[in-house]
Image (cartoon, rainbow, N blue to C red):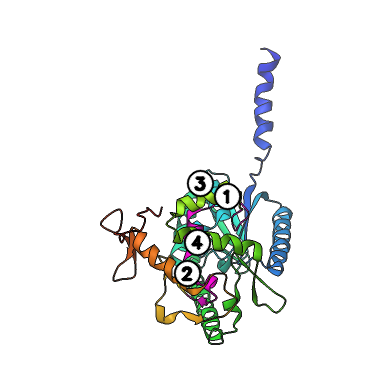
Amino acid sequence: MPDDEKLKPVIQTILRTIPPRLTLTRVALYCRVSTQMERQLNSLSAQMDFQRQDILDHPLWEYIDTYADIGSGRSINSRPGFRRLMADCEAGKIDLIYTKSISRSGRNCVDFLMVLRRLKELGVDVYFQNEGIFLSNESSELILSLQAALAQAESENKSTDIRWGIRKSTTNPDSPAFSIPCFGYVRNEDKKLVINDHEAETVRKIFSWYEQGWSIVRIKKELEASRIPSPKGKRRWAVRTISDMLSNEKYAGNSAYGKTVIAEYPSMRQIRNDPDQVSRSENHHPAIIDQSLFDRVQELRLLRTNMETDERGNRVRKSTHYSFCPKGSVKTQEE
């Protein structure tokens, strides 16, 4: 018998006595803060360092990556970091998600539970550090459901309190809510709105061109051809930016707060507020254009637009592509 054949039973016996290699759990870290305030960003950095080290110190865990989001993002779809995390879970790259708490993971109870159930289907566990809960534990879903519902209620109460506080402050015409600057204005040392002369000249041109019969598209092309930078400093101007400027009553010296609100879940869309709920401060700051020009432009916009407001306050397209223009005026298409 060859020597190799004699050694086979011995080798097989040795291999059976060697313990199998331990498979490390692939762990991803998820962190989130709700604002870009320096204090919260510093907190996020410290949180990420601590939790990353916690993962690295675990003998059976393998650190994969950190996924982070900055911003309120009540809807999960509005969080790019979380979307990237879920994509990697779907691709089978992650076994366990390590996160600080339920409130940091999601404040929309329905979305949150749907995500947890999808992770269970994928075989991905979740560890909530503050609560000390693993998703894989029996009865954990009930506890997580209650915690998520409480987090959502707390978030909604905070939002309501903040909106109420701001609305109450706008009963004062000098409220800071009225002094949020837009293109053409800056705030001085006293937090008052003052005119930025260079930008104001562009604002006057836009209103003047529109009054002369120019369409918004033509105004956009002229601004770009004249190499006038947009409010964001870009070479290209957005049609929506010009349209918003033409309807902004701040340029006539007046300020309003609360024209739009966020609709309730699940829509969460920005919608027009009830006019009775809008706070106003007339002659609040120096005007860039006079009131008569602003009013004239609003009339022209109503005549030229192919959109109208229905009885429910929704913007809908008119039955004809072009609206009626009085004799002598220029028939134009807004967009």
Which residue position holds label 1?
Answer: 95
Looking at the image, which is closer to me, 264 or 327?
Answer: 327
Q: Earlier in the sequence, mark 2 or mark 3?
A: 3
Q: Mark 1 vs mark 3: which is more N-terminal?
A: 3
Q: Earlier in the sequence, mark 2 or mark 1?
A: 1
* Mark 2, residue position: 293
Disc 1, disc 3: CB below 8 Å?
no
205 displayed left or right of 16:
left
Q: CA distance from mark 4 to mark 3?
A: 55 Å
Image location (x, y in percent) of residue 276: 41, 82
Residue 12, visible in the rendered structure: yes
Q: CA distance from mark 2 to mark 1?
A: 63 Å
Q: What residue sits 49% from the left and 53% below the top?
A: 219
Q: Which residue is mark 3?
A: 90
Q: Which residue is mark 4?
A: 208
**Foreground: 245 or 110?**
245
Q: Earlier in the sequence, mark 1 or mark 4?
A: 1
Q: CA distance from mark 2 to mark 4?
A: 8 Å
Q: Nearer the viewer, mark 2 or mark 3?
A: 2
The structure residue drawn at horizontal position 27% and vertical position 55%, both measured from the top left corner, is 320
Q: Hey, what amino acid is under mark 4?
A: Ser
Residue extending farthest to the top is: 1
In front: 108, or 239?
239
- How far is disc 2 from disc 3 in space, using C-alphas? 57 Å
The picture quadrant where one finds residue 264 is bottom left
Q: Which residues are magenta?
A: 229-258
Q: Amino acid at mark 1?
A: Asp
- Three-letter amino acid code of the residue under disc 3: Glu
